[in-house]
Image: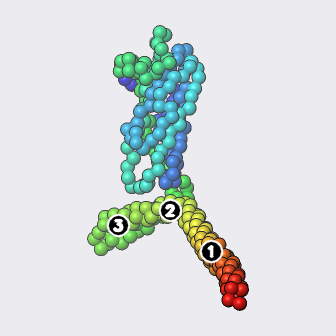
Amino acid sequence: MSKPLFDLPLIIDPEHELRFVGPFHKPVITIMTLRNNSSLPLVFKIKTTAPKRYCVRPNIGKILPFRSTQVEICLQPFIYDQQEKNKHKFMVQSVLAPTDADLSDLNKLWKELEPEQLMDAKLKCVFELPSSEANAENRGSGEGAIGGGSATAGGGSAGANTSSASAEALKSEPKLSSEDKPSNLPDSSENVESLSGEIKALRENNSELRKENTHLKDQITRYRSSANIKQVNEPYAPVLAEKQIPVFYIAIAIAAAILGLLLGKFLL
């Protein structure tokens, strides 16, 4: 339940608005300061109407008496449209911790509290562009207004304003994509170069292995051919029977000579 400001022991800075200053194609962070202005520990919890668009750290915590803490609120990147109305809000709920409360588990303590015990404060979110971008937006809107005035003379200013707003939105979209793309191009080109270098090295190793394989085959072929030539050129070694043939003939000749002598004696 909401209470008057003088009854609240929690002091919030900023009090009513959270301002986020662009550009909004990257995370934008703002700081909220919470101060416990009482003599008892204070427990707080922060909620938002757009939980997917914000990151709050911490979103629940405790503050000792007369101490303060800072809460970091991070707005996620998005495409900003100045014509779109922002309805995002934050609510800070707080309660003075009971004397017998266990402050080690704040989520459990928060579930045990009754809604009537809670004090809450609401803050709305405001999106702002830097001065240079704001001037560019104003110049674009001024040109749209001039075009709308001339169209009014012809009988149609609303259509010109709508077309200029849509043209601004279309211009803002490719600008973001062109900023995001170049950051990834160097990495991809380096990867392609490294892969091509590895492929080239593998091809060279493959060709070297093929050359070594061919060289080994040639050596094996030469070794086999040289072994066959040595076997052909070895001297002829006759067998034992061939070596014994001349001795046999000599014995026959000696026997014939003796027989001839004997026959000659008997005949004479």
Nearest to the observer: residue 247 or residue 266: 266
x 37%, y 49%: residue: 85
Q: Is residue 260 left or right of residue 20?
A: right
| Whole-percent x, y for residue 247 in the image | 69, 78
Q: Quadrant of the N terminus?
A: top left
The numbered disc on residue 163 is 3
Q: Could you tell me which secondary element the residue under label 2 belongs to?
A: loop
95 w.r.t. 258: above or below: above
Question: Of the residues under marks 2 and 1, which one precedes in the sequence?
Answer: 2
48 w.r.t. 94: above or below: below
Within 10 Å of the Cα at label 1, are there few (<14), some (14-19), or many (20+) other Cα atoms? few
The amino acid marked with disc number 1 is Ala
Question: Of the residues under marks 2 and 3, which one precedes in the sequence?
Answer: 3
| Residue at the disc numbered 2 | 181
The numbered disc on residue 241 is 1
Q: Could you tell me which secondary element the residue under label 1 belongs to?
A: helix
11 w.r.t. 197: above or below: above
x 41%, y 68%: residue: 146
Within 10 Å of the Cα at label 2, are there few (<14), some (14-19), or many (20+) other Cα atoms? few
Q: Is residue 193 left or right of residue 253?
A: left
The amino acid marked with disc number 3 is Ser
Q: Is residue 88 left or right of residue 41?
A: left
Q: Quadrant of the C terminus?
A: bottom right
x 32%, y 69%: residue: 152
Q: Could you tell me which secondary element the residue under label 3 belongs to?
A: helix
Q: CA distance from mark 2 to mark 1?
A: 98 Å
Within 10 Å of the Cα at label 3, are there few (<14), some (14-19), or many (20+) other Cα atoms? few
Residue 7 in sight in this render: no
Q: Nearer the viewer, mark 2 or mark 3?
A: 2
